[in-house]
Amino acid sequence: MAAQPSAPTVEHYREPLGIGQARPRLSWRTTAPPDWRQAAYELELSLDGQTLRRQEASSDQILVPWPGSDLASRQTAQVRVRLLGQDGAWTEWSPVTELESGLLGPSDWSAQPVGGAWPERPHSDDRRPALVRREFQAGPDLASARLYASAHGLYEVEINGRRVGDDAMSPGWTPYADHLRYYTYDVTDWIGLGANAIGAWLGDGWYRGRLGWDGLRDHFGSDLAFIGQLELTYADGRRETIATDASWRAGFGPILRTGNYDGEDYDARLELPGWSSPGFDDSSFSPVAVGRRDPATLRAPSGPPVRCTEEVQPVAVLTTPSGRQVVDFGQNLVGRPLIRLRGPSGATVSLRTAEVLQDGEICTRPLRTARSTDNYTLAGRPEGEQWEPRFTFHGFRYIEVTGWPGDLREAVAQGGLVARVYHSDLARTGWFECSNELVNRLHDNVVWSMRGNFLDIPTDCPQRDERLGWTGDIQIFGPTAAFLFDVSGMLSGWLEDVAREQLPDGTVPWYVPVIPAKQRWTPIRPGAAWGDVVTFLPLALWLSTGDLSIVERQWESAKGWVDLLDRLAGPSHLWDSGFQLGDWLDPAAPPDDPAAARTDRYLVASAFFAASTAKLAQMAELTGRTELAGRYGELAQVVRRAFAQAYVRPDGSMTSDAQTAYALGLEFDLIPAEARPRAARRLAELVRQDGNRIATGFVGTPLLCDALSGAGQLDSAYDLLLEEDCPSWLYPVRRGATTIWERWDAETPDGQVNPGAMTSFNHYAFGAVADWLHRVVAGLVPLGPGYRQIEFRPRPGGGLSHASARHQSPYGLVAIAWRLSSDRLVVETEVPIGASASLVLPGQAPVELGPGRHSHSSAWPPAEAD
């Protein structure tokens, strides 16, 4: 096998069209014999009819510098790479990657926001969204056509009657005043010679739709407007621009109302055939209202858009005790229903969604005030009708169907109702499997919860009247997310919005984008574990991707946070005052007071002060800020000593004799070395005393198994993992859960839904244990940025007979699979070209591994415990 590089990838894009960088970095993967090593690379760049080649004597292959001059707006380039091996031979050239820049400067924009000019009742959910349209002429010899699109609200574009793109809920949710995303579409094939037409559907979305618990509306603006710039480029270089302006017209379409929380009402009798095609009679339309948008706030996306990634078929049609019909999809998911039906004009089908049943009926109480219902009124077309709501999403397993014309069971059997799964279209990168099917289902539940809550931003829940980008949830889940999917573009972009929303004093919001909320959350106050996302997440992304620029971009944000904590702590170096959530949702906390945990909330706060300061020192070291690295490293040591003096007794016990306290002390290295063994034993004792059940909340849970297994209490960690009684990770699995729950007892053993106001059945935070499954159970550990250095360290236990993990790293596939065979532990590993690894088996000296596939075995059980 000859060495061969892949086509280069561009930054973190899956599709490098309309990118926002003038000097995008390039990466590639290499297939080669195991003993092959890269000594140099040569990039070939074709730009504006000229070809440039640049060689670098380097083994780097991840995010290498752009080889040419800065890209201008709208510029297309082709790039390929070849490699020089240490054997002195060049590879063949890779396949070519074509990339194209978007609109890189404010002066590139001429489009203005346009929408309906009619009077509307402000702060209402019943405002009917507009359609906007315009006709235009296209001449001969068209070479290319690009549409740059955004909106105040949500948009979906049609040209000449054809849908443009397959994205949904665009342009997504950002702090709109400072940052509004636009997307780029290649619409060359949509444009015909002569008369053409372009039109856009609009929906409220996050911009002016209902947000949060308090029924906030019009927070970002009351207008609903499309921003579109269609550019036609001809063979002779001429460019014509059709931009949204006063020449457009607006009218009503068949959508009567639409919102993220409440769903969509649609009357098919009001459809306007041909409205986005030339020649349509738009005399019922009126001139648009032209709004304002600072073009400097328009930015290209850093990650993929939301798309439908899967269709799920129903598994049953149920008849409830009240006689209602409910369709069960067998999987709690996030998305929208699609219906295919035939019936009389004016008949209305109502689709009401829910995550769970209670007493045989759909249980909507956990949705709080979210209506979560879609209504479709039929046009009565003899050939039948098909409909899916455009501008909403729901979290559901069940749909209660009312008003279906005909036999619902027969229709479902023939494909008349399916669930379409929507989330940010992230590439899957991580997999895990073991011999315990309950643990496998737990891991599947983590994946499903991540999919459902990574819909443009990382949310807490996808179903009730909330759906916010909580900083604490992704702080603890970041490593798991980065293993399972390529979140680099999405989360690095979201972190930039966190920095935009950060207060001048360094306070990090509870959730981003920020909206006003109840007294607990507004005004914004600093909170441990939530605000620490600005130090934890950039390093987690750097480790998974090798992208140091994420750390650099977030430096000021992270420094502002740690400096704030230093001021708040003062001379004591303890953060022991102010509002804190502490170990949120400790199972011992009452349903109406989820912050009332067993662990002192100020112990939690001081622990995170120490941890964030240490991480900031690491960020400083990585980015070449040597003096600051030393300063913050010393501060971290001072805070550690203050923590130990205040919260750790000489015998290793802690002032809060609770699982979370010990987990924080052990994992954040806050317990003096001589006291660590006793603290670890006490943590294991607490686990046994609690019957191997979880006694931790948001803060302690992701650290617990690591604290145990890292301190010589591996058996106790497995006991926790495999416990099936409530509260435990496997209790929901035993109860039939298909996603991760917000509360350990979201459904109580008697089958009732927890009475607390916060009872989501799709909340990824407690699924952070998957990171421990990947690193400890399977034994796949990233040691160097982008998995350039890997440690394989499987730790069998819990009666498992085999486990495996795979991760598609920037360098290629990293994999481990182990099995217990008679009296041997057999381990198979795979290391990609460009990376190196070490294998550490229980009771054995480390073995260094190069690229390729390897097989090793050792005696089991080991003669010497690891």
Image (spheres, rainbow, N blue to C red):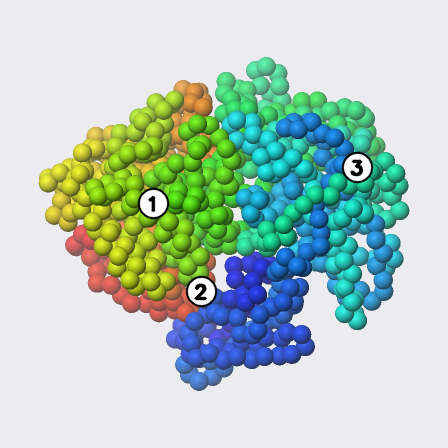
Callout 1 amino acid? Leu
Q: Secondary structure at mark 1?
A: helix
How far across and down, in percent of the image, does residue 62 sit?
46, 66
Q: Which residue is mark 3?
A: 251
| Quadrant in the rendering for residue 285 | top right
| Quadrant in the rendering for residue 531 | top left
Q: Earlier in the sequence, mark 2 or mark 3?
A: 3
The structure residue drawn at horizontal position 26% and vertical position 29%, both measured from the top left corner, is 598
Q: Which residue is farthest top? A: 322
Above/below status of 318 relative to 808:
above
Q: CA distance from mark 2 to mark 1?
A: 38 Å
Dot 2: few (<14), some (14–19), or many (≥20) neighbours within 10 Å?
many
Q: Given this view, does label 2 or label 1 mark the residue nearer the observer?
A: 1
How far across and down, in percent of the image, does residue 395 sit?
55, 33
Residue 398 visible? The answer is: no
Q: Earlier in the sequence, mark 2 or mark 1?
A: 1
Which is nearer the eye, 42 or 21? Answer: 21
Dot 3: few (<14), some (14–19), or many (≥20) neighbours within 10 Å?
many
Residue 224 visible? The answer is: yes
Q: Given this view, does label 2 or label 3 mark the residue nearer the observer?
A: 3
Q: Secondary structure at mark 3?
A: strand
Contact between labelled residues 1 and 2, with CB atoms less than 8 Å apart: no
Above/below status of 212 relative to 74:
above
Q: Which residue is mark 2?
A: 811
Q: Earlier in the sequence, mark 1 or mark 3?
A: 3
The structure residue drawn at horizontal position 56% and vertical position 62%, both measured from the top left corner, is 21
Q: Given this view, does label 1 or label 3 mark the residue nearer the observer?
A: 1
Say which mark, if any, is on residue 564: 1
Q: Secondary structure at mark 2?
A: loop
How far across and down, in percent of the image, does residue 280 sit?
87, 43
| Quadrant in the rendering for residue 383 | top right
Callout 3 amino acid? Gly
